Image (cartoon, rainbow, N blue to C red):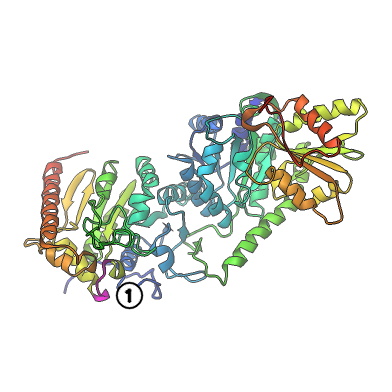
Amino acid sequence: MTTTLLTGNHAQSLAVKLARAQVVAAYPITPQTTIVERLAEMVAEGELACEFLEVESEHSALQACISAAAVGARTYTATSSQGLLLMHELLHWASGLRVPIVMGVVNRAVAPPWTIYTDHTDTVSQRDTGWIQYYAESNQEVLDTVLQAYRVAEDPHVRLPAMVGEDAFYLSHTFEPVDVPGQDLVDAFLPALDLPYALDPANPARLGSFMPPDSYMEHRKNVAEGMAAAAAVIDEVEQDFRERFGRDHGGALPLFECDDADAILLTSGTAVSTARAVVRQMRAEGRRVGLAKLRVFRPWPVDALRELAARVPRIAVLDRSFTFGFGGALFQEVRNALYSPTGGPLVRGFVGGLGGRDLTPAVIRSIFDDVLRDGGPEVTWTGLKEGA
Amino acid sequence: MARLTIPEQELMTSGHLGCPGCGATLVMRYALKVLGPKMVLTVPACCWAVMSGAFPRTCVGVPFLDCAFEATGASIAGLRAGLDARGMKDVTVVGFAGDGGTADIGLQALSGALERGVDAIYIMYDNEAYMNTGIQRSGATPWGAWTSTTPVGKTGRMKREEKKDIMGIVLAHNIPYAATASIAFPEDFTKKLEKARSIHGPRFFHVLAPCPPGWKYPPEHTVRLGRMAVDSRVFPLYEVVDGRYRITRKPGRPTPVAEYLRLQGRFSHLDEAQVATIQTRVDERWARLETFETMTAEVVR
């Protein structure tokens, strides 16, 4: 184990190397580009033995990964924003074909208008495509989560693709000290991919066949079961990771100061770091607030969320994305999981930090203040300019 | 007795779901005879995504990966990379797509694969329209044809644009091998496949596949129409090896184009002048092809 200063993007590249990805498909988009640039350098320097495809679009990047995975190769690609949106059809292909691709997504707001700054609308809007979704808070977590994502995606009970999100610039281009595990440790944690249905001329078979109504539904149910199984596998993999590497990131929904909280905030990505500092300050002032970090959005951690909800009376959900439903997507899903005709905690939605707008301690504090008061609106856009 | 030049092996079984007289089924059958069994096939949305059979049945006896409509070029790239990464370098990768999936929606991915020199064979079977969805115009539909999106009606509307020159587009990528072929000339087709198999890099086939419901003719005329397309010079057979053109069949006394058109309901609305226009264009294209052959004869790479 060595400690190195790394950007989030280079943490991602290094994890891909440590994971011994066999096929990498690369296409540039800001702020993702430095991930694949670094991988290209590793290939050029002879540090990474992989098939490196400089494809002509994100769409082709993902199809290339799907096809390479269909013959049993461990694959990686990375993108952001518009690139992820261009991949939309292929996202469904990957999960439907049960190919365990891992993709880095540097979360960037979507155009128009053009922007390159952080928000999660790109990945959140792909929540229905059958991909496991992780959101990282630090560069250490980026590196560790890529390794974990391969283990989870390739698990025989799961066999679904996974995306690992990191916030544009806050992580992608910011240096942090990262403990880099040795290759032998990673090899022991992450054995070579074994995909029993990989296409092979020795045993001709078909992947993706036309399905009539007598079998399509069962196929979809199988995919759904793979996603459901991922919940437990994510925890198992986290535990194994902790035993081997001496650290972990708390599973799908790590909690901070929630036990006796009057109100908690649930959010994801780098906003969690700011929120944790605010919780510490407010606790020091004697106010009982807590924090739930949504590290995994797919599979949706419904059980952990229900356990939490049984203990806290008020939940503020901060969406760093907006998808044109009633409130943000996380807010909708929290409410959906917690709805009960006989009550339950108060759940209020906050939308903030879009397009790189800072989620400052003052904004986070205002959300806590707001949710602790009675009678506020169900959905609030927070951190808007005066008069907007 | 003539020597048997078409391989005997059959990797396509009976029981395909194509229409009676489907030309595209013969394209697959001959391709598999030469390229199988050590191959992986990838097929986007097209007639062949359906004709092969519905889960769990298939009439194709080689590994078969369905891919997105517009992504065959990327799929062959991924298959090649995946197989190479796993040490299976001796497995041939074959993309097999229709004219819409190649010359229209799949053109970008195809261009990318050709430009990057992907070591794979790409076969475009050309039935000259979106036949799987019910005969809609594609870029490969010839001038003058009726399709369901270029109906003739009272205004005399029809396809008003020339057929896209996919061979020209493909050859602009300077790939080592490209050829046209026809299901009516299987010896020519399989010989070209044999040659392509021995070449490294991107190899492209443009194979004309007559379609009874789409072209509106009785199913028993499929091979006859394939032959007439070649012998009328509407669809010349040639190959381009490292930039050198070679016409592989030169009809001495070409069949009048009118005879080829007359057998097809999709051209039944054309008047004599329009038919004459097509004949002129066919003659011009043939002359150009012969010029290419002469011009490139001395090309050495």
Residue B250 visible in the picture: no
**Is B190 above or below relative to A175?**
below
Q: Tag 1's secondary structure?
A: loop
Q: Nearer the viewer, residue A37 or B297?
A: A37
Query: Which residue occupies 26% across, 50% down?
Result: B164
Q: The numbered mark 1 sits on a residue in which chain? A: B
Q: Nearest the camera: B99 or A382?
A: A382
Q: Tell whether position A364 is magenta.
A: no
Q: Is residue A64 above or below residue A27?
A: below
Q: Split into 4 quadrants, where in the image is the N terminus of chain B? A: bottom left
Q: Is residue B217 magenta?
A: yes
Which part of the image, by quadrant, shows the C terminus of chain B? top left
* Picture coordinates of residue B4, whole percent (x, y): 23, 70
The answer to which of B150 and A146 lies nearer the viewer is B150
Amino acid bearing label 1 = Pro
Left-right relation of A300 to A20: right
* Quadrant in the rendering for residue A180: top right
Residue A149: x, y in percent? Answer: 66, 44
Can residue B73 be spotted in the picture?
yes
Provide the residue designation for mark 1: B20
Q: Is residue B87 left or right of residue B217?
A: right
Q: How many marks?
A: 1
Counting from the top left corner in percent of width and height, residue B49 is at 43, 63
Residue B194, how many percent across, how many down?
Answer: 28, 58
Residue density around tag 1, few if under 14, some if 14–19, many if 20 or more, within 10 Å: some
Eyeballing the image, is A67 above or below A295? Answer: below
Task: Give the residue furthest to the left.
Answer: B253
Residue A49 left/right relative to A121: left
Range of residues picked out in magenta? B215-220
